[in-house]
Amino acid sequence: MLILAIDTALEACAAAVLDTDAGQLLAQESLLMKRGHAEALMPMIARVMQSADLAFTSLDRLAVTVGPGSFTGLRVGISAARGLALAAKRPAVGLTTLSAYAATVVGQSGTAPVISAIDARHDHVYFQIVAGDGSQLVRPSVAPIDAAIAASQFGAPHLVGNAARILADRWPKDGPQPVAIDAQPAPDIGWVAWLGAAANPETTPARPFYLKAPDAKPAAQPPLAAQAATS
C-alpha cells in the first residue's frame, strides 16, 4: 500500500510517502513553522511525490492529521488531503494528533502509560492517556492542566506532545514522577503514515476533530433597528 501522509496541525508542515509492502518511507520532508502552512504545503507535497517517483494516481490512500491543533493549520492540511483524494479518486483518512503523538512512544518505557498533551492555551491542554500497549485509558479531552494531571491514576507516565514539558513542570512532587518527557513540537510524519495504513476509511474520515470552539469568534451583528439608524 502506498500512502501520502500530511501534517499541518501544529508547529510543523510535513509530508511523507509510505510503502507498507517495503516497510519504509520512500520520501519525507518536514519544516518547523507556526505560520505559513498554506504557502508551504503544496510545494512540499510536490517535492515529496517527485522524490518518491510516484504519480498521485499510484497512491492507495491519503492520511492527514485532523486535530486537535491550530484551526488554520487543520483546514490547510485537511483541504489538501480531500482535494488530492478527490482528484486521484482515492480515500482520505484522518488521524488525531494525540494518537500520532502516542504512537511514537508507546512501549518505549515498558508498561508505563503514555499521556499525549497539546497546548490548548489559557492554562488548558488537550490530552489523551493510553496504556503501554496502546489501549485507551482516558479518551481525548480538553481540561485545565491540573485536571489533566489529576486524571492520570495509572502510575508513572511517559509524557509526549508539545505540552509535555508544561505538564512535567506542574507535576506533583509527591506523586510518581514521569519516566520520560518527549516535548515534540509536532507528531512524527512517518507515524502519521503508518496510522493511516491501519485506519478504516469508513470510520476515520478526513474531517476536523475539535474538542473546543475557536478562540476567535465573529463579531455579533447589531440589531436591525441599530443598523437602520446608522444607514
Image: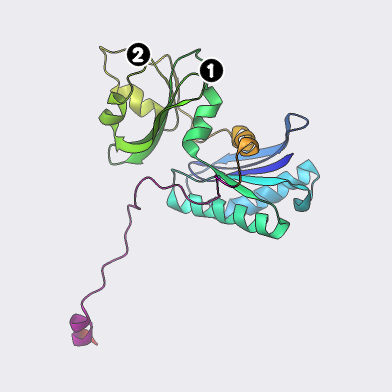
x and y percent of residue 13 in the render?
57, 44
Q: Nearer the viewer, residue 34 or 27?
A: 27
Q: Name the residue under label 2.
A: 177
Query: Answer yes or no: do the residues labelled 2 and 1 have beta carbons within 8 Å?
Result: no
Q: Is residue 207 magenta?
A: yes
Residue 25: name its quadrant. Answer: top right
* Residue displayed at 53% across by 17% down: 107
Separation of residues labelled 2 and 1 (CA atoms):
17 Å
Q: In which quarter of the image is the C terminus?
A: bottom left
Is 92 rendered above or below residue 147? below
* Residue displayed at 49% across by 30% down: 184
Q: Nearer the viewer, residue 12 or 93?
A: 93
x and y percent of residue 48 in the render?
71, 44
Q: Is residue 176 magenta?
A: no
Q: What element carries label 1?
A: loop
Q: Does label 2 or label 1 sit earlier along the sequence?
A: 1
x and y percent of residue 61 in the render?
68, 46
* Residue displayed at 30% across by 36% down: 143
Q: Mark 1 points at which residue?
A: 107
Q: Quadrant of the N terminus?
A: top right
What span is in magenta?
202-229
What amino acid is at disc 2?
Gln
What amino acid is at disc 1?
Gly
Of tags 2 and 1, the one toward the viewer is 1
Other-residue count near label 2 (Cα within 10 Å), few / some / many at <14 / 14–19 / ≥20: some
x and y percent of residue 152 in the render?
33, 22
In the rendered view, does 214 fall on the left or right side of 225? right
Q: Which of 70 and 87 is in front in this view?
A: 87
Is 221 rendered above or below residue 13? below
* Residue displayed at 32% across by 64% down: 218
